[in-house]
């Protein structure tokens, strides 16, 4: 039986990590085209931290609660036939990209944004997949147009996004480089398949990329840093290279000489995932199931989980995220 009330994490009007508290509220009712999931695990992501801090409000119509990815079991279907027509049934174990609301015992998710737990994975591993896979797929493969035989650079390679990007790019047949902050993070990236890891605190990644590629540059860069990295990224791209921006940890403003954009025929693009339409996300999910789920089953792509916190300890999980000392995913155990 589904209760009327559930436990969730509240963050009030926002602020530091300590504003998050355990609270009780109504269980969401799945609308037509949605399923209700009893949450087993939820992933912790940078957008959650930004929303909690007050700098990344949810889009209109989304849950005000934190949490963009979960795993668990379907316990109810919306009042229509869409979920059933798609082959989903009560009791199915799934992982899902949420529009918010994952830091809770129950979350309602559009049918198109749920995926089966991959063969050989448990619910903890499955919960660590959606946000990273959707993000990397749409930005590296779709927008970045990475192809087999090309070279790829991802900044922040030891993050959840970074490690996923390394594995997906290697599975796609690319040569992969990354930047990291320390030797332990470099080793984690090399273990995930990176061909070289550049220590950005002591090495100039522009010079290192030039040396690694014989001054050619790389074909695709995935950047979460922004700031002065923007100009340096443009210098590190090859002819017809593509720079894909997905975050601005050092800020969105920079002084840039864009001459290289013309002389090297570069593409500078980017995206944010959360505001994308349900149909866009459903198309990504279909592509992931067709193209990436078989690679997961073969062991080519798997999440790296740093630490699992109880839901009540979400503040500690966010503090760890903000420290940037973790390698891989930070998770919350909900049920």
Image (tube, rainbow, N blue to C red):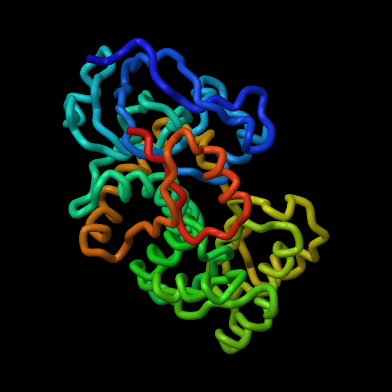
Residue 35 x/y as whole percent? 29, 24
Q: Is residue 334 left or right of residue 100?
A: left
Viewer-side residue, 214 vs 251: 251
- Quadrant (top left, top right, bottom left, bottom right) of the C terminus: top left
The answer, for residue 150, to whether it is visible in the render is no
Q: Is residue 219 left or right of residue 107?
A: right
Viewer-side residue, 253 vs 218: 253
Q: Is residue 27 left or right of residue 139?
A: left
Viewer-side residue, 221 vs 45: 45
Q: Residue furthest right?
A: 255
Residue 114 x/y as whole percent? 31, 36
The residue lying at 28 percent from left, 17 percent from top is 78
**Count of numbered marks:** 0
Instruction: Examine the image and state in which quarter residue 266 appears.
Output: bottom right
- Quadrant (top left, top right, bottom left, bottom right) of the N terminus: top left
Instruction: Examine the image and state in which quarter residue 206 appears.
Output: bottom right
Residue 176 x/y as whole percent? 47, 74
The residue lying at 44 percent from left, 44 percent from top is 309
The residue lying at 29 percent from left, 66 percent from top is 300
Instruction: Examine the image and state in which quarter residue 81 appears.
Output: top left
The answer, for residue 88, to whether it is visible in the render is yes
Q: Is residue 89 left or right of residue 253?
A: left
The residue lying at 79 percent from left, 62 percent from top is 256
Residue 233 x/y as whole percent? 66, 68
């Amino acid at each position: 039986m589904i209760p009327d009330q559930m436990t969730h994490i509240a963050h009030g009007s926002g602020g530091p990590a300590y504003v998050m508290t355990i609270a009780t509220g109504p269980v969401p009712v799945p609308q037509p085209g949605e399923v209700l999931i009893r949450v087993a695990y939820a992933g912790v992501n940078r957008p959650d931290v930004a929303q909690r801090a007050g700098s990344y409000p949810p889009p209109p119509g989304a849950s005000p609660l934190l949490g963009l990815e979960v795993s668990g079991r379907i316990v109810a279907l919306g009042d229509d036939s869409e979920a059933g027509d798609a082959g989903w049934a009560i009791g199915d174990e799934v992982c899902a990209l949420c529009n918010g609301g994952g830091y809770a015992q129950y979350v309602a998710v559009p049918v198109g944004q749920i995926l089966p737990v991959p063969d050989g994975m448990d619910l903890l591993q499955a919960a660590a997949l959606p946000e990273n896979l959707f993000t990397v797929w749409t930005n590296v493969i779709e927008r970045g147009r990475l192809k087999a035989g090309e070279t790829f650079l991802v900044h922040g390679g030891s993050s959840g996004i970074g490690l996923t990007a390394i594995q997906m790019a290697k599975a796609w047949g690319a040569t992969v480089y990354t930047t990291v902050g320390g030797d332990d993070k470099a080793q984690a990236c090399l273990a995930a398949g990176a061909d070289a890891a550049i220590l950005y605190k002591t090495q100039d990644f522009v010079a290192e990329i030039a040396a690694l590629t014989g001054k050619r540059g790389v074909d695709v860069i995935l950047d979460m840093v922004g700031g002065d990295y923007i100009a340096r990224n443009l210098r590190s791209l090859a002819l017809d290279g593509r720079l894909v921006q997905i975050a601005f940890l050092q800020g969105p403003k920079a002084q840039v000489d864009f001459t290289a954009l013309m002389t090297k025929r570069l593409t500078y693009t980017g995206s944010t995932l959360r505001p994308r339409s349900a149909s866009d996300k459903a198309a990504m999910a279909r592509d992931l199931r067709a193209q990436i789920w078989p690679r997961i089953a073969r062991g080519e792509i798997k999440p790296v989980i740093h630490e699992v916190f109880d839901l009540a300890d979400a503040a500690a999980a966010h503090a760890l995220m903000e420290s940037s000392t973790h390698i891989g995913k930070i998770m919350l155990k909900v049920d």
